[in-house]
Amino acid sequence: EDDAQNGPDHVDSHRSPAYVISPYTRRAAVDHTFYNTTSMLRTMEMLLKLQPLTHYDATAALMFPAFAAEPDTRPYVAEAPRVALDTTNPPRPAAAANLDFSAPDRIDDEVLTAILWQALRGVPPPPPTRAAFLSPR
């Protein structure tokens, strides 16, 4: 999931992963219950004995199926990072030095996309596909 605050964009907005990390989490379980962001909020409110803030979280589904009745305090084996976390980022491209991030929508999307593509994939982006609608004369 990308960002839930401004509607769907390039990521399917119908699914947002939620990680429940607790000794009360059911281990090796996948919960297919429908939740939304207010479900998470309502569950936290219930655990902290707080009243709902609005009718949205008051009526949200609680995340009970994600939890077990008894804590499981067995240690777990942490997965080693697949990316070195102690390396320095590569130098910023010269083109990025002139981007204005002082306010939203002040930068050219195509320029930023090209910079990010190059940084993540190591090669320049392919030329954009242009479509034209022509009518016969």
Image (cartoon, rainbow, N blue to C red):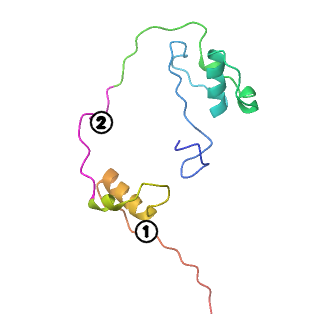
Q: Mark on residue 28?
A: none
82 part of magenta stretch: yes
| Residue at (28, 34) in percent of width and height | 85
Where does the magenta region start and end?
80-93
- Residue 83, located in which quarter of the rendered image? top left
| Residue at (36, 62) in percent of width and height | 125
Quarter placement of the C terminus: bottom right
Residue 124 vertical placement versus 10 (above, below): below
38 part of magenta stretch: no
The residue labelled by disc 1 is 128
| Type of amino acid at the residue the image marks with label 2 | Val
Q: Residues within 10 Å of mark 2 (few under 14, many from 20)?
A: few
Q: Residues within 10 Å of mark 1 (few under 14, many from 20)?
A: few
Q: Is residue 98 left or right of residue 132?
A: left
Residue 63 lies, in percent from the top left, at 64, 22
Of 97 and 68, the residue lying toward us: 97
The residue labelled by disc 2 is 83
Q: Is residue 8 visible?
A: yes
Residue 113 lies, in percent from the top left, at 41, 59
